[in-house]
Amino acid sequence: MKRASVHRSHLPVLACAAALALSGCGLSTAPILDPKGPVALAERDLLFDAITLMLIVIVPVFVMTFVFARRYRASNTRARYTPDWSYSVAIDAVIWLAPAAIVVALATLVWQSTHRLDPYRELAATVEPLKVEVVAQDWKWLFIYPEQNVASVNELAFEAGRPLSLRITSDTVMNSFYVPALAGQIYAMAGMQTRLNLLADEPGTFAGRNAQFSGDGFADQHFTARALTKEDFASWVETARAAPARLDQTAYDELAMPTIGHAVTHYSGVEPGLFDAIMAKYAAGPRAHTGDMSDAR
């Protein structure tokens, strides 16, 4: 997919961002403002559109504050003095209609964007998405590749230019899966699954983390998202398949124990149905034995 060019209406926002970046804040390298995939790019543009709309009110307010303070200062005898003035239909209309129009415009924009950027919707592409199952643990991330029959801890590898379809759950408290350069955050909840579809335009390494406070090891609960070429991803899969450890139930129970700063680990095999079994642990009744869980939407 091609990245869209910067819209002209975003120029004021980009100018402000550029000014802050030049001041040393480092915003030019912030992944939210420098996205590497179409989903994050659309979300950034939505942010800029919303800011631009709100500036229609904010900028005139600040300008008028300085203009009025100067024009109607006590020493300015040329300013018109109207002590009996009390009401203006024109001013009242502007005060109410302008914000109302902005609220309607923002609501329409958010409504359309919410449906267009539905994280459950698969991205349009000519290739099948790579499916990965994600499990949040204390305090690390487990990634299961059911089609490749491998798994990794704290490392999400995938092909650049190929959609990535994620099923996400938690084997502990609520967590939030977040790769700012590629997509918005989405929650991971025990006994339920959420979904996220994303894509990287080009190879690169991106930071991912838990965006929901989850206890003592929260600050170190991050992972590396690696967008690779097709050949490099195939090589990564072969490396994982050569790992000595397999992720059976015994290995999983040991992995699920709380650890902080867990090193990147690969597993050369995964017990079938492990992701569904993890969700079923938190279900009551007959569903606990079938793994038939509903999406958390």
Image: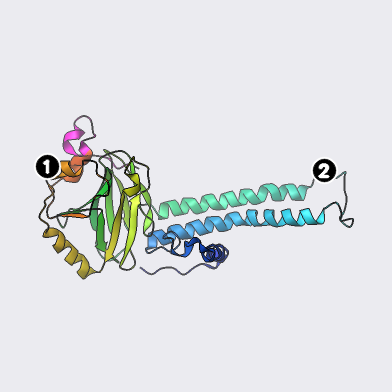
Whether residue 129 appears in this view of the structure is no
- The foreground one among 32 and 296 is 32
- The foreground one among 101 and 40 is 40
Residue at the disc numbered 1: 250
From the viewer's perspective, is residue 268 above or below residue 204? above
- The foreground one among 94 and 213 is 213
Q: Secondary structure at mark 1?
A: helix
Amino acid carrying label 2: it is Ser
Mark nearer the N terminus (2 vs 1):
2
Residue at the disc numbered 2: 86
Residue 186: image x %, image y %? 36, 48
291 magenta-colored: yes
- Overall secondary structure of the magenta section: loop
Which quadrant is home to the N terminus? bottom left
- Residue 272 relative to residue 190: left or right: left
Badge 2 vs badge 1, beta-carbon distance below 8 Å:
no
66 magenta-colored: no
Bounds of the magenta segment = 280-297
Q: Residue at x 13, y 50 (%)?
A: 270
Please identify the residue farthest to the right as the structure is shown. Answer: 77
